[in-house]
Amino acid sequence: MIHIDIIDRWKQYLHEDNIPIEWLAIHAGLSKRTTIQILARHKPLLPKYELRLQRALVDYEKQFKQL
């Protein structure tokens, strides 16, 4: 499932790159609470949330993961 990959990739980036959860919440257009609940799998990843997290992931990778 694609949404599991998105969640796992974000968890990896948040941990390895020491990204504040607030950064992800702001760039995904979600509240900090909703972001934490989605990453902890306490809240279902609805398509609208999945799209926002995917866009934030693409933006993050373009900005910080370029070689």
Image (cartoon, rainbow, N blue to C red):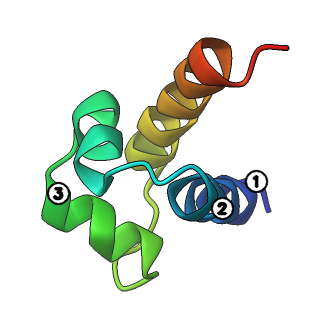
Left or right: residue 37 compared with residue 60: left
Depth check, mark 2 against mark 1: the one in front is: 2
Depth check, mark 2 against mark 3: the one in front is: 2
Question: Seen from this angle, which residue lies furthest right?
Answer: 67
* Quadrant the N terminus occupies: bottom right
Q: Which mark is residue 12?
A: 2
Front position in the image: 31 or 47: 31
Q: Which of marks 3 and 2 precedes in the sequence?
A: 2
Q: Which of marks 3 and 1 precedes in the sequence?
A: 1
Residue 34 screen position, x and y as percent: 22, 63
Q: Which mark is residue 2?
A: 1
Residue 22 screen position, x and y as percent: 22, 48
Q: Is residue 42 above or below residue 49?
A: below
Q: Residues within 10 Å of mark 1 (few under 14, many from 20)?
A: few
Q: Do labels 1 and 3 touch, CB within 8 Å?
A: no
Residue type at mark 2 is: Gln
Q: Which mark is residue 24?
A: none
- Could you tell me which secondary element the residue under label 2 belongs to? helix
Instruction: Look at 34% across and 35% down and name the residue there.
Output: 28
Disc 3: which residue: 32
Q: Is residue 61 above or below residue 67?
A: below
